[in-house]
Image (cartoon, helix red, strand yellow):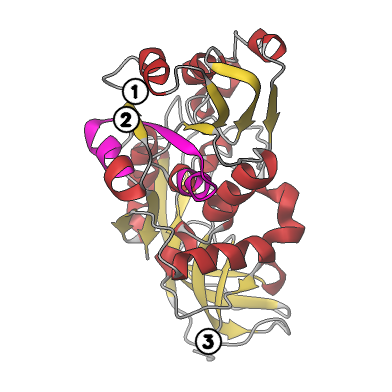
Amino acid sequence: MSDISNLPNSKKIVLKSRPDGDPKVGDFDVIEETAKAPDDGEVLIEVQALGVGAWIRTTLNETAFHGSTPIGGTLPSMGIGKVLISKSDKLKEGDIVSGPLSAQSFATMSGTFFTKVVNPEIDPFTQIGVLGVSTGLTAYFGIYEVGQVKAGDIVLVSGAAGGVGMIACQLAKLKGAKVIGIAGGKEKCEILVNEIGVDAAIDYKNQDIDEQIKLYAKDGIDLFFDNVGGEILDIALDNIRDRARVIICGAISQYSHHDDVDGPSLYLRLAEKYAKMEGFTVMHFKDRYEEAYKELLDLYNQEKLKVPFHIEEGIESFPLALQKLFTGGNTGKLMVKI
């Protein structure tokens, strides 16, 4: 499409009211309008797929690290799409791009916000689920650079059945570590063991986490990759051994009540064990994205990385997908097919 006189209708998901606790479908509206024609430097993109990440919940507060979504504002999301009309010197019509498309079926934005996908033959779900900034790249830098995982380490991963967690588990295994994953439910734990290849899985809904860690890591853990926070973080701190590394990647258990965060009470274990706790976001490594992308792509092509996808259909399903993320209704990277 290059005719701006025949612009498509676009649907977008907007914030109707700020969630009280976990996000619910009723907190959002679906708005339909004609897509905006691009101005100089802008592109009109047909959205193909969107990632649904826990970080989106933090933007629904009035103040937020990732920026606050105003009432009536379109929900943020990273995704993959095809350029339909380009008035940007950076991108041409037909290019497949990745970037902050937001929860909408068509996006008109500056071309500078987007990166051309160098392997457009790879489907958009793999692009997001394995090679995405908020999935594969986050796991890559968290495990390799921040966590400094090495052969023989005992690694514990919370949120292990999510998009980041599954890749973190596999990257640690590829370095020769013993990996224990924490997830909710028997089915997720079976997938972690039988498909992802972790050495052991702990069902936090039906098992005593502390008891299970001591069963699988009787001398303690060397590296804890945390996506959950709260009580699980304290239990992990109580099971670290000397010079352990605790990596704070996320805290999905705390995102719905930022004004009353349940922080770690056992932080003195860090001093007792001469250990360290370090947080990060993938944005701290943006000058090295290309390096990580190439390595992840190579591992994927060698079939050494696999991530199950949970895909909801249609932009209208975005609110439900976000709700499912906080109720444990997905296994693997949660995405919406547009």
Report the disc number at residue 94: 3
Q: Position of residue 182 (x, y in %)?
A: 39, 30
Residue type marked 3: Gly
The range drawn in magenta is 168-192
Q: Would you name the residue on which mark 1 appears?
A: 204
Q: CA distance from mark 1 to mark 2?
A: 5 Å
How far across and how far down the image is residue 112, in percent?
Answer: 72, 70
Q: In the image, is residue 174 part of the stretch drawn in magenta?
A: yes
Q: Residue drawn 36% across and 39% down?
A: 323
Near mark 3 (Cα within 10 A), the count class, few <14, some 14-19 or many ≥20, is: some
Answer above or below: position of 153 versus 32: above
For the residues labelled 1 and 3, say whether their Cβ atoms are less than 8 Å apart.
no
Foreground residue among 87 and 313: 313
The quarter in which the C terminus is drawn is: bottom left
Task: Indicate left or right for 279 with 171 as reference.
Answer: right
Q: Nearer the viewer, residue 201 or 229?
A: 201
Q: Position of residue 24 (x, y in %)?
A: 37, 35
For the point 57% across and 41% down, which residue is it? 151
Residue 184 image label: 2
